[in-house]
Amino acid sequence: MKNRLRVLRAERQWSQADLAQRLEVSRQSVNAIETGKFDPSLPLAFRLARLFDTTIEAIFFDEAENAE
């Protein structure tokens, strides 16, 4: 699953540590999500969407759907 997390974070000039603190997770977790090594739990995905004032679908997308 791909995501726009790095772009959204950069638009706010937040470091991975800043985002991690806001989400109450480790910086390593943020890095793993951004790089696609880890898909967040549904509760964490909802927290991300609320934090960025958007929908989960606007942050995360299936790369296979975009290939069509």
Image: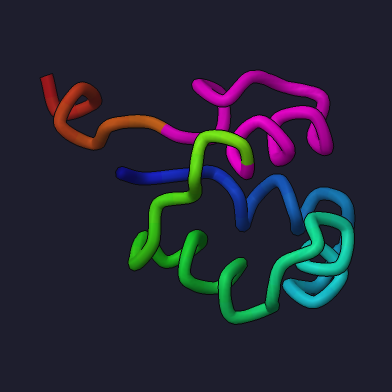
Magenta residues, start to end:
44-60
Residue closest to the eye, 26 or 59 = 26
In the image, is residue 3 above or below residue 46?
A: below
Front in this rendered view, residue 48 or 5: 48
Of residues 3 and 28, the one nearer the viewer is: 28
Which SS does the magenta portion mostly show? helix
At a point 50% along the width and 21% down the height, the residue shown is 57
Which of the 4 quarters of the picture holds residue 68? Answer: top left
Q: Is residue 42 magenta?
A: no
Task: Specify whether 60 is left or right of 67.
Answer: right
In the drawing, does residue 57 fall left or right of residue 30?
A: left
Q: In which quadrant of the rendered view does residue 24 lie?
A: bottom right
For the image, the number of numbered tags is: 0
Please determine whether, in this image, residue 15 is positioned above or below residue 62: below
7 with respect to 23 (left or right): left
Residue at 47%, 70% (x, y): give it. Answer: 32
Which residue is pictured at 86% across the width and 68% down the height?
21
Residue at x-position 57% and y-position 71%: 29
**Looking at the picture, how far across and down is residue 9, in whole percent?**
75, 54
Q: Residue 58 sits in which quadrant?
A: top right
Q: Picture coordinates of residue 12 (x, y %)?
A: 88, 52
Q: Is residue 64 left or right of residue 59?
A: left
